[in-house]
Amino acid sequence: MSAQCHDADGGGGGVDVTTPRIALAGSPNAGKTSVFNALTGLRAKTGNYPGVTVSRFIGTSRIAGDDYLIEDLPGTYSLEPISPDEQIMVDVLDGRIDGERRPDAVLAVVDATTLRRSLRFVAQVLGRGLPTAVVVTFTDELTARQGSLDVEAFEEALGVPVIRVVGNRGQGIDRLREVIIGWRSWSAPVLAPPADRAELDAWVTSVLAFAGYRSPGRHTVTQRVDAVLLHPVAGTIVFIAVMVLFFQTVFTLAAPLQGYVETFFGWLSGLVSTHVANPWLAGLLGDAIIGGVGSVVVFVPQIMLLFLLIAFLEGVGYMSRAAFLMDRVMARAGLEGRAFVSLLSSFACAIPGIMATRSLPSAKDRLATMMAAPLITCSARLPVYVLMIGLLVDPSAHVGPLGLQGLIMFGMYLLGAVSAMLAAWAFKKIGGRRGTTMPFYMEMPPYRLPTLRSVLIAMWESARTFVRKCSTIIAATTVALWLLLNLPLHGDADLRAHGVDPANDTAVSAYVADHSYAAGLGRLVSPVFDPLGFDWRINIGVLSAQSARETFVATLGQVAAAEDPEHPAQALRAMTHPDGPRAGQPVFTAPTIAALLVYFAFALQCMATVGILRRETGGWKWPLVAFTYLTTLAWLMAFLARTVTALVTGSG
């Protein structure tokens, strides 16, 4: 079994029309993804449906020598769509996706602990007339909570194959594969389930009675814990405490690992210096590629730990409780609970957050959420925050038992979340009053301890995206920047004429950087950033961050290495303004660092996000609005942060 890559543009041309296509359909939290992962080997390619940007997941399962395409459809409780992603699911089952045929068969995944509700969904799937089998999950939990289900009788009542599966443990997967092989000969009900609501309710009751179904008892642990976590006051306090501990952990546990990564890249750079004689080639390899990319990769421990904790909280079931608490906050911003799910996705990256707005029925809500999503603190900001906070605060600084660095990081994430709420509220006001509010369902699954494997896979898939960006966009940007920092060339005579000893490598590096094309470009935009306390080196970093925020860290790493190749970290801390009214003063003062942190909190610096905004809104109007308002807001708030910090600290 293996995962098969699906073309990134989301078209259907890469799918072999002769390969059986099996669709996985079910509600959120029914265990559909666990079944999908078990069938496809835990890996799959994500893409989009043709013409839209609703995510799709397709994997290939090889069974008895034959390939089967397994498609994990968006989760929904009903085939009566009220949002674009639910509409896509219906269109897939009805064969209305351009250039693609209907699935050959459907696996309807249902949760045994909520079987009465799930049967209504199964009835709608059976009404499509496709070969259908039912996969029953969480039967182990049903039994543990004194519930019961006779699977054989359930199969007889439905008239279609029924397979009992515990996806996260792999139980029943072999039997499921055997059933998939015979999809052409699956039995079908003699009569389709009724469509009338009253008749459907009677059908559901009769099926459950025939199957000897007994609903599970209350999950006592979940009930007791939710009494605290869902309480308006106690739940909010716990939520804040969890977030504070979250960032304390990111800083505390990742620091030693970060040191190992720094040592490794320092060792690689040393090898280049020792064995590569050509100074230009040594600079390209040691400073641009190893130094530039390494200065970003060094933050991989923080990134992986961040996603590890997020995956654990999601797996346990806490995130749905956090969404419930935040629903009240979203309501104050004029949005519904679905918007929180979109914004929550933006903590990894704004792009999936913007794409997730497809679950919102209201076009006004979708637009307001898209305009707010870039303000949520994404993983690309984390390296910048860690670097700047490290320059601002000593690691030993504490407020009581809590590290000050972690508290500032929590404050930055809180700033992003509050700003996103305010931006959404403003755009809802601009867009006018919304229409009828559609019902919002968010299931509160019982607390479950996720498997270590599932948590590690979720962490790795997210971290891999960050590492891939380092090897592509960031690598290309750092090489271009290295050239800008080292051109034009300066001969020995030119160096001596300006009082620089050609034999002094540190002095030569500093002179070349200060008179490079990069320095000229940084000084060109100085009138814009001077009020924020930025010098030309920071300006270059801010400009390079337009391709990807992480390149700001790589840029400063290269600039520091150019000025002092032996001790770049010390060079960064010791940087002073080379000219102007602040000549000789430190660059990274508390007011300047505060301005940088706030600027990055608000600025829209990811061109991929701009591109996805254009695709989602159907034109350039709203992406330009987003870029303009966020860039302006970033400058104004950074200036305010610098002014306030200067007044508090008495420094400039």
Image (tube, grey):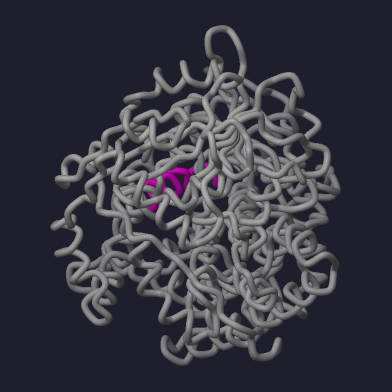
Quadrant position of residue 251: bottom left
* Residue 211 forms part of the magenta stretch: no
Q: Nearer the viewer, residue 153 or 170?
A: 153
Q: Does residue 7 lie above or below 425 as drawn?
A: above
The image shows residue 54 at horizontal and vertical percentages of 66, 52
Q: Nearer the viewer, residue 276 or 414?
A: 414
The image shows residue 285 at horizontal and vertical percentages of 67, 32
Q: Nearer the viewer, residue 216 or 251?
A: 216
Quadrant position of residue 556: bottom right
The image shows residue 521 at horizontal and vertical percentages of 81, 63
Q: Nearer the viewer, residue 216 or 59?
A: 216
Is the magenta region chiefly helix, strand or loop?
A: helix
Who's the residue at 46% across and 37% down the image?
A: 460
Q: Is residue 104 found left or right of 499 in the rendered image?
A: left
Who's the residue at 69% across and 20% down the image?
A: 19
Who's the residue at 60% across and 41% down the image?
A: 293
Q: Is residue 634 found left or right of 613 in the rendered image?
A: left
Can see residue 574?
no
Q: Does residue 351 lie above or below 582 as drawn?
A: above
Can see residue 509?
yes
* Residue 298 forms part of the magenta stretch: yes
The image shows residue 169 at horizontal and vertical percentages of 31, 29
Q: Which residues are magenta?
A: 296-310
Q: Does residue 410 lie above or below 501 as drawn?
A: below
Who's the residue at 85% across and 67% down the image?
A: 619
Quadrant position of residue 437: bottom right
Q: Does residue 628 lie above or below 612 as drawn?
A: below
Count the marks: how many? 0
Residue furthest top as drawn: 65
